[in-house]
Image (cartoon, rainbow, N blue to C red):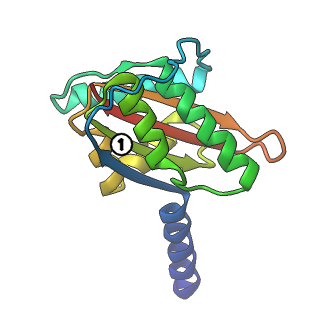
């Protein structure tokens, strides 16, 4: 019985390690302007996840982050890519980061992704239990955006959360 429990624990850890990841990039602002996306409609899961992130940041003595619709739009684009390709990854993060740097003047950009967490609390807990994700959540950032998109075919949620220092 102990062997089965150990195997199940190993599998659970392996799944958790592969179901979310973190990435960061730093860069200089480019004056090449691209169109800023100002309209974004937040769903309840997105609003709750942002609220929980800010509550955590404030609880450890950090500033609350301001949301930016353009960043959330870039998050949504990435979720749509992950759903269409049945993957969870940071593909094209450099392009998202450069866009946010170019359009918003960001000095630093970080990204967390997650998959198949049913609640904002579960996603945040997983991110805080992972050093790379926690570093982004508690990082030297001023703004953020998020998208939580449900795959219509599977019902599973994809999370992309991008942080920026502006």
- Residue 120 visible somewhere in the drawing: yes
Q: Residue furthest right?
A: 153
Name the quadrant containing residue 77.
top right
Residue holding disc 1: 110
Quarter containing the C terminus: top left
Q: Is residue 26 above or below residue 105?
A: below
The residue drawn where x is 49% and y is 22% is 70
Which percent across, then down, holds residue 45? Answer: 58, 26
- Residue 49 visible somewhere in the drawing: no
Which percent across, then down, holds residue 68? Answer: 43, 19
Name the quadrant containing residue 75.
top right
The residue drawn where x is 52% and y is 19% is 35
Question: 1 and 146: which one is in front?
Answer: 146
Q: Secondary structure at mark 1?
A: strand
Quarter containing the N terminus: bottom right
Residue 130 relative to residue 148: left or right: left
Q: Residue furthest left?
A: 61
Question: 163 and 106: which one is in front?
Answer: 106
Which percent across, then down, holds residue 149? Answer: 66, 35
Which percent across, then down, holds residue 122? Answer: 50, 43
Question: 99 and 123: which one is in front?
Answer: 99
Residue 43 relative to residue 144: left or right: right
Category of crowding for the residue at label 1, using alpha-carbon neighbours closer than 10 angstroms: few (below 14), some (14–19), many (at least 20): many
């Amino acid at each position: 019985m102990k062997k089965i429990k150990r195997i199940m624990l190993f599998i659970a850890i392996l799944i958790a390690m592969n179901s979310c990841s973190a990435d960061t990039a730093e860069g200089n602002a480019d004056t090449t302007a691209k169109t800023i996306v100002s309209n974004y409609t937040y769903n309840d899961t997105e609003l709750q996840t942002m609220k929980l992130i800010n509550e955590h940041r404030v609880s450890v003595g950090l500033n609350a982050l301001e949301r930016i619709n353009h960043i959330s739009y870039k998050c949504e684009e990435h979720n749509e890519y992950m759903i269409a390709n049945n993957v969870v990854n940071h593909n094209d993060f450099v392009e998202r980061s450069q866009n946010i740097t170019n359009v918003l003047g960001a000095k630093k950009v970080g990204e967390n992704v997650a998959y198949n967490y049913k609640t904002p609390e579960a996603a945040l807990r997983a991110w805080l239990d992972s050093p790379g994700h926690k570093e982004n959540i508690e990082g030297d950032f001023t703004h953020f955006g998020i998208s939580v998109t449900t795959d219509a075919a599977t019902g599973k949620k994809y999370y992309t959360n991008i942080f920026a220092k502006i």
